[in-house]
Image (cartoon, grey):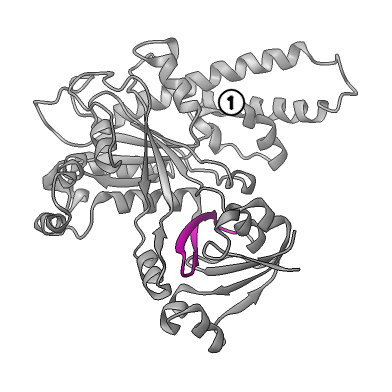
Amino acid sequence: MARIASSHLMPSLLVPMKQLRFGVLGGGFGRARPFSSSRISMSLRAGIVGLPNVGKSTLFNAVVENGKAQAANFPFCTIEPNVGIVAVPDPRLSVLSDLSKSQRAVPASIEFVDIAGLVKGASQGEGLGNKFLSHIREVDSILQVVRCFEDNDVIHVNGKVDPKSDIDVINLELVFSDLDQIEKRLDKLKKGKGKDSQSKLKASEDAERSALERIKLALMDGKPARSVTLTDFEKEAVKHLCLLTMKPIIYVANVAESDVADPGTNPHVKEVMSLASELQSGLVAISAQVESELTELPSEERTEYLQSLGVSESGLGNLIRATYSLLGLRTYFTSGEKETKAWTILSGMTAPQAAGVIHSDFEKGFIRAETVAYDDFVAAGSLAAAREKGLLRSEGKDYIVQEGDVMLFRFNV
């Protein structure tokens, strides 16, 4: 017998909402490679990184509710990664929840990881180098905070505000770390060459060796690993190394309150913007100080404060949208009387794959997906009304889920 899967009909079959994990750091380059579809059902991790005193922990504290990072004017004040979960702002969720008269609304969430700052020489163990680099290796994507504000009361680790220099420091440390790892791995592959010529692993090792040799050349030329074109088989072969320069990066230009309304006039932001364009990276301008001040205001006063600065929303929304865009992420919804829930998937996922994000059984036993576009759902007023008006479609296994789809899965296991 076919079964219907949705968050409001079968809560016992739902697994906890998969979180996107991000780490915050300062600096980065290159275009992100999209995650493989096999990864979406797992936690995606991203780290916030940056040189000391660029404002990364202030940003982390501001955007993560109940964040515990100790922001202070002292290098390495965040020695262990701090983790916090942030709900993804999406006004569509409350609209659907109200229309469905849901008992609760469950947003998608992002997990931010605040990683201790690094300095020049981190790849050789300077500062918190080795620990820092190992923490970055554990994340899937990086938010690199770059200082773009002047403040004599907040010392800069290198004595002056210089975004390009800061970015170069971090990029070089990541490159050096990857080069060291690749050279060790190539040496190991060379020593094992010919021992098991008939081994099932030979094809994989040959692909890995070929890919690493090309990546090594790119790194020696100052280019990130993600700039190298690899086949799917080669990507899989080198994935176990968790190369740092393979990770997607967004530059987060941290500006002063006075630059929030028009950050493009800030010469430091212009420099970062140029670098981001050249390196095909994401870029978001945000004021960590403003975000911090927002957390101290009652919700009803936040809008008024933002309007006084000449902006309509906090930087968190822009940051999350940029992250979604960089990683190629999309949102679909399930909605009913018990709950309305937002689910995060990769762009291009089919209906069965999207169902699998809720529970693997939904993908394995997928029959079809009753689907209606968000705008059509809102216009109709309910799922039942959408069905009556012919707006609810029955989609099969090849259907590519669209942004904002409201879905009800039918499956059999």
Residue 323 position, x and y percent, is 41, 48
Inspect the image, locate mark 1, and give the three-letter code of the amino acid beneath it: Leu
Residue 7 position, x and y percent, is 53, 61
Q: Is residue 337 left or right of residue 370?
A: left
**Number of marks in picture:** 1
Extent of the magenta region: 330-348
Q: Main secondary structure of the magenta part?
A: strand
Task: Looking at the picture, tell me which residue is in the foreground, 250 or 213.
Answer: 250
Q: Is residue 29 left or right of residue 118?
A: right
Q: Residue at x 50, y 28 (%)?
A: 138
Q: Quadrant of the N terminus?
A: bottom right
Q: Which residue, given by chain and number where applicable, does mark 1 sit on?
A: 217
Question: Does residue 52 show up magenta in the picture?
Answer: no
Q: Residue at x 28, y 38 (%)?
A: 66
Q: Quadrant of residue 353?
A: bottom right
Secondary structure under badge 1? helix
Residue 120 position, x and y percent, is 34, 16
Q: Quadrant of residue 380?
A: bottom left
As drawn, the residue found furthest toward the bottom would be 389
Q: Is residue 56 left or right of residue 379?
A: left
Question: Does residue 343 show up magenta in the picture?
Answer: yes
Q: Is residue 311 above or below residue 255?
A: below
Q: Residue at x 73, y 60 (%)?
A: 365
